[in-house]
Image (tube, coloured by chain):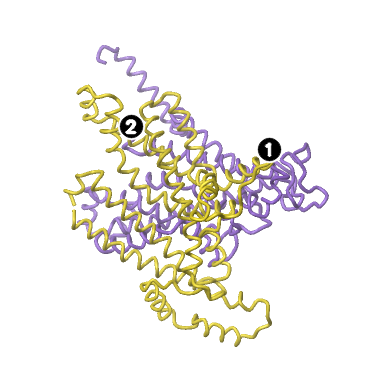
Chain colours: A purple, B yellow
Amino acid sequence: MTAQPPTAIGTFTAEARARSHHPLAPVWRFARRKPLGAFGALVIFGLLFTALFPHVFTNLDPTAFNGLQRLRAPSAEHILGTDQFGRDQFARLVYGARTSVSVSFGAITISVLLATVIGTTSGYFGGWVDAVMQRFVDAAIAFPSLIVLITLVAVLGAGLGQVVVALGVVSCFGTSRILRSAVIGTMANPYIEAARVLGAHPIRIMLQHVVPNVAPVVIISATVSMGGLVLAESGLSFLGFGVPPPTPSWGSMLSVDGRAYMERAPWLAIAPGVAIGSIVFAFNMLGDALRDTLDPRLRQ
Amino acid sequence: MSRYLLRRVLLTLPTLFIVSVLVFVIVRVMPGDVTQVLLQDVRYSKTDAEQLRARLGIDRPIVVQYVDWVTHIARADLGNSLVNQDPISRKVGQALPVTMELTLFALTFTIAAAIPIGTLVAVKQDRWPDYFVRGGAVLGASLPGFWIATVVLVLAGRFLAWSPDFEYHPLFVSPIANLTQFLLPAFILGIATSASMMRLTRGMLLEVLRQDYIRTAYAKGLTQQSVVIKHALRNAMMPVVTVIGLHLTNLLSGTLTIEIIFGLPGIGRVMIDAINTRDYPTIQTVNLLVAASVVFVNLGVDLTYGYLDPRTKVAA
């Protein structure tokens, strides 16, 4: 190493410094090191764009019935064919992105907020507060999620907002467990003790010193759970407890009422599943890449 | 060890108590009740509905109802359905074995596929079987099970003119028909869980294979097979066993949709019907049984730690 001419090292670091000053430098570095993760991010951006501007992709109405065009095979007019009500399958797929985006991003916001409150409180106070809260978490995660979701949707009533709240609540407990262990790890740091000695209020310590330090854990587990949320929403819609019709949703496009027609019209079965699969795949890939990049234990 | 055991066993009690309170309260927060279902075909007044509620006992204070329910459960009396007064034990007794069989088959498939394949690709790290299997694993975990099932049935129906037997055959009446009937749904149900368990096995094994004692074992002249299976795998198994409980809840969620697609009369159907008719005792009891089985499986998993890792015996 010492044999290397000092000038070479000098130019290298200067170059690195120049590059790191660019605001997009970390993004570029991430894309180069984790191509699959970057691909996942790209797919998710595509999904967001589709959800925001669906009319760019299709000018057909996803909810318009057309009795004369029932169960048409894919053609130039209907790229992905039509369903049993004569609705354009491609338009439903495009507008269904809105449902997936609202559900996954809405639910993850609720889930992360609740998980942070539960995990931080439980990990910060420890002792009996922790013991009691963790028994509640134990109880909550003992239920299979789909059963709780169906019950919660029955309690809250049908609707997009209700599905979002139900998914957010159900998924927060698992995340809170991961957060709690991260918080307990952070508590051992001397700066927490210092803040306590200075007489800072627990809430201040949590917000100023604990939460920012577990933020990477929050980001990673949130990204990983988003794929699961998309899957959960599709399962819920499949069983008829999801976002109510006529709002297009990928899960309900595969649901029980559509299934009767699928043997005659297999295109109805393929596209929504491919859409769900790609989005979940993208979230999983991005989550894995973020974990490798942000988790200090895995960092090279 | 025994203190740890005792503590671990005792901790399930508050959890089960909270589970029972949660299911009890949540069903009663649902809008509407069973009287709307029972009286839907007749013209009825408010007093009719109230009389019916009184007869079913769902007008009593919630605490009284809870104590009544729990004391009956403690005496192994699961109660009766509010809809038709059938004993819940009969309905659950018919549906639970179906779900259990499906879940256990899927779990067996998960373990049987995930651990050998995960081990194989860990040994062949960064070679083509590794890439191929890892890609497949992420994909398998990304596709909804009910969609895979739908596509398989649609394609099989269209191109092979084959459709599954939608008539349910109990295991002890016609075992062969039963087993062939469960094979495909259990396989599809297990795809996602085996994918994630495979990834975990691979990751854990890679960590262990870098340890000094593995190098020592190779230096002693042991074969790769012996090093990987006897020395590495056992040490890598701890986290893999830990997630079996988690996989069980995932599988139980997945059975809901798979049962409906394959027409299997399991817990999923019972649960959905009970929720739609606001049949409180059925929802409560089924939920309690399912959650309790998850709690006990997790307990069992914790107790196997002592066998897998003798250090936990000493430490606790």
Q: Is residue A194 left or right of residue B106?
A: left
**Quadrant of the image for the N terminus of chain A?**
top left
- Please tell me which residue is depicted at 80% across the width and 47% down the height of the picture: A69
Q: Residues within 10 Å of mark 2 (few under 14, many from 20)?
A: some
Q: Is residue B147 visible?
A: yes
The residue most toward the front is: B173
In space, the residues marked 1 and 2 are separated at their CA atoms by 43 Å
Q: Which of B243 and B73 lies nearest the eye of the viewer? A: B73
Which three-letter amino acid code belongs to the residue tagged 2? Leu
Quarter location, residue A217 = top left
Residue B159, which numbered label?
A: 1
Task: Specify the subunit that label 2 lies on.
Answer: B
Q: Is residue B192 left or right of residue B236?
A: right
Label 1 with label 2: CB-CB less than 8 Å: no
Q: Is residue A196 left or right of residue A79?
A: left
Q: Which of A114 and A276 lies nearest the eye of the viewer? A: A276
- Please tell me which residue is depicted at 32% across the width and 14% down the height of the picture: A7
Residue B206, which numbered label?
A: 2
Q: Secondary structure at mark 1?
A: helix
Q: Secondary structure at mark 2?
A: helix
Which three-letter amino acid code belongs to the residue tagged 1? Phe
Q: Position of residue B125 (x, y in %)?
A: 38, 27
Q: Is residue B25 above or below residue A45?
A: below
Q: Position of residue B274 (x, y in %)?
A: 54, 67
Q: Position of residue A141 (x, y in %)?
A: 40, 57
Quarter location, residue B119 = top left
Q: Is residue A123 above or below residue A44?
A: below
